[in-house]
Amino acid sequence: PSVPRDGELPVLPPDVDRDTFNKAVAELTELLGAENIELNDKPLVDGWYMEHPNTHDAFHIVQQSELVSSATVYPGSTEDVQKIVRWANKYLIPVFPISMGRNLGYGGAAPRVRGSVIIDLGRRMNKVLKIDGNSASCIVEPGVSYFKLYEEVQKTGLPLWIDPPDVGGGSVLGNCIDRGVGYTPYGDHFANHCGMEVVLPSGEVLRTGMGALPGKNGADNPSWQAFQHAYGPSVDGIFSQSNFGIVTKMGMWLMPETGHQSYMITFPRDEDFEQIIEIIRPLALNRILGNIPQLRNVIQELAVTGKPKSFFYPGNDPMPREVIRSHAKNMPCGDVAWCFYGTVYGPEETRNMQLDIIRREFAKVPGSKFMLPDELPADHYIHSRVRVCSGTPELRELDWLNWKPNGAHLFFAPITPTKGADARVVHEIVTRLHKKWGFDSFPTWCVAGREMHYIANIVYDRADDDEKRRAIALMREMVKEAADEGYGEYRTHLIFMDQVARTYGWGDQALMRFNETIKDALDPNGILAPGRAGIWPKRFRGKGYEL
Ligand code: ADP
């Protein structure tokens, strides 16, 4: 639905009057062409995942008109990005780069500061620049989605996999620098990137890793996608989850295709999770678990059917455990509490040896049950997991959104060690606070090895202001209580960035002071994504922008 908007449009960047803004836009139009700049002065349309807006957060958790841009600009090249950055410095207009803006649950395409100009890199810079079959790597521009990279790899006929996250429409580059995860053995996206090209807030261009050493006769360095480092400090990390630069190209490693076998194991009791996690840890550390497996609460078996909550339960309060289980009983998983989804890789013999150990270890949990995909119906969620875990992008995970009318979601995503006792502390906080604020709780543990990402997906009705208010209160309390116990988020939505960043306050906010020092050195005018990751440039600090 589109909602009429009040006041004079577009909204203006901070400290910029309308005349100056119009003059600045006229100059940008000269620089890039009228077709490559669009004012945000029309009704806001949320669209859906594949037709998402680049004007605001489609999954608004505050008022829809709150986190909005003044305009969107579409660069066609690194040089265009440099021009835009220099223009922003001249007029002190904040710019907010997005690759594709499908960052739903973390802010979508919205800028942190109202009235910023969005640099939509992906619209025109959307090419796979290189696929190298020998070194199993590629170079992508910001507008390459997982679907597109998948298709391009398929076209080459090379035996290579990509690593998609839960839904495949997002930007490979954008997800990587936001440190997103996928589920094949290459699931840690940032760990599998190799080399960047970055436009700095000054307008200068930098290449990281071996790309810093020019190739012969001006060619790209031949080792750019082979070795992640250069000589000297490793700087790539400071361009992830930051506002220190705009990434215009990125190298990614691709996984050589291999055999794979997915499976599901169910566990009957709510309190089993501690024992399950204790079993997972050594298996993960010894690489018997081949990928980033997921331990999901059984309520998700209901949610991924794509049926609304009202199909299962008439109330708007959190669905009682007995009701969840009474429905699960009639589903392929049966009357259980947890479902574990994993995949093993390699030749059949290796896989079978791994599966034998996995079956044996999890059988220690009384009542657990091991299932293979061909034992489950064709429409079961596991078949979508099989594809994601073997490098094929999917959209199935979006079916969750049907849970609520006008469904949107928000993630609470703390990190814990892979230990039952730590898992319990966080899980109890999440369960108690979801109940307090009236939400169903959808916990999933994604296990990388020594640590787990606990992902609690808050599904809310974005047309219901009270529900939005409660979702924010729930998030704020979970962030605080988890941090008091020593657990912090790996990523968060725009409006919680300040709070989460402050929880990383060891040494009287030593990390934030370090980030601010870098920010002020690289971006003295404070034009690049102010406030992103809680990092505010000098011009904005202490002026009431922090949330
Ligand atoms: P996706 O399409 O995967 O959802 P987004 O384009 O929304 O990803 O990117 C996620 C976040 O990462 C954005 O909100 C933005 O702050 C940051 N970001 C994305 N692309 C770039 C880029 N090329 N350079 C700098 N920051 C970026």
Image (cartoon, rainbow, N blue to C red):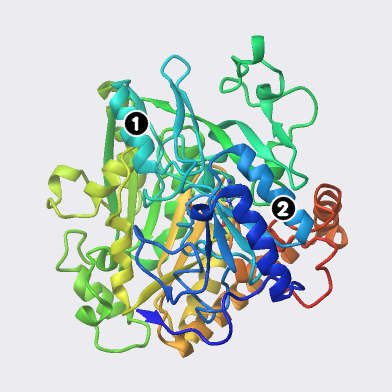
Q: Name the residue beneath numbered marker 1.
A: 152
Tell whether circle 2 marks a residue whose Cβ is less than 8 angstroms from ligand 1. Answer: no
Q: State the quadrant of the N terminus.
A: bottom left
Q: Is residue 313 visible?
A: yes
Q: Which mark is residue 85?
A: none
Q: Quadrant of residue 51?
A: bottom left
**Residue to which mark 2 is pinned:** 87
Tell me which corner region of the image, top left, top right, bottom left or bottom right, holds residue 191: top right
Report the label total.
2
Under mark 1, the amino acid is Glu
Identify the element where label 1 is drawn.
helix
Mark pair 2, 1: CA separation: 35 Å
| Residue 95 percent coordinates (x, y) | 66, 58
**Crowding near pointer 2: few (<14 within 10 Å), some, many (20+)?**
many
**Is 65 in front, or is 452?**
65
Image quadrant where one finds the C terminus: bottom right
Please tell me which residue is depicted at 62% across the width and 71% down the height of the picture.
Answer: 495
Residue 418, can we see it? no
Going 48% across and 17% down the picture, which residue do you hit? 135
Tell me the kind of residue under disc 2: Trp
| Disc nearest the viewer among 2 and 1 | 2
Residue 355: quadrant of the picture = top left
